[in-house]
Amino acid sequence: MIQRMAKHSVWMLAVLVIGLSAAALYAAPQMANDQTAGSQTVTGCLQKGLETKGFFIVDSDGKHWELYPDKSVSLGDHVGHTVTVTGILAKRTAAQEVKSQPYEKKEITGKEHSDLQVSGLKMVSDSCTK
């Protein structure tokens, strides 16, 4: 009897693992598509922010974008250039926002504001037009 229960438990475990694996594989492409769907593209003059490692863009509509680059993106090489950045809206903690508020208030000067987690950069021009 115990051997029979053990045999059934092994099969149940195998079925459970296969079922969960299939569910995870099915969900992974959908999560990637959700991030792509939430993608933002912004073009403007890349400027050095007041924070250490801080950068921002003011787009053609006057919206201020605080930029947080992925490790694969080097914003510092393009300060003073017109660039197009791509990414998703950054999810910042309350503590991170409090820390950056004094700097952002000086940079924004009353314009609409968003934070962008930058995953890509394309240089449009090696200068900025005002």
Image: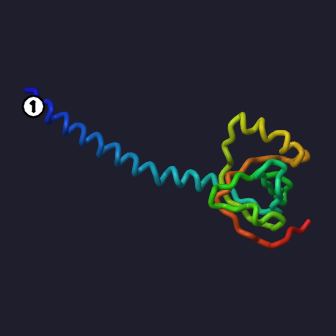
Q: Is residue 99 left or right of residue 12?
A: right
Residue under the point 29% across and 46% down? 18
Q: Is residue 12 left or right of residue 59?
A: left
The kind of residue tagged 1 is Gln
Question: Neighbour class for label 1 at 10 Å: few (<14), some, many (≥20)?
Answer: few
Residue under the point 10% across and 32% down? 4
Disc 1 is placed on an element classified as helix
Q: Say above or below: 60 vs 68.
A: below
Q: Say above or below: 5 vs 106.
A: above
Which residue is situated farthest in the top direction here?
1
Which residue is situated farthest in the left direction here?
1
Q: Is residue 99 left or right of residue 24?
A: right
User: What colouring style does the render use?
Assistant: rainbow
Q: Position of residue 120 (x, y in %)?
A: 66, 62
Q: Position of residue 119 (x, y in %)?
A: 64, 58
Residue under the point 81% across and 63% down? 79
Quick one: quadrant of the N terminus?
Answer: top left
Quarter of the image where one finds residue 56: bottom right
Q: In the depicted view, which residue is nearer to us: 90 or 19?
A: 90
Which residue is situated farthest in the bottom direction here?
125
Quarter of the image where one finds residue 8: top left
Q: Is residue 19 left or right of residue 95?
A: left
Q: How many marks?
A: 1
Quick one: quadrant of the C terminus?
Answer: bottom right
Which residue is situated farthest in the front direction here?
52
User: Which residue is the site of mark 1?
Assistant: 3
Residue under the point 84% across and 49% down? 50
Q: Position of residue 61 (x, y in %)?
A: 84, 56
Q: Position of residue 3 (x, y in %)?
A: 9, 31
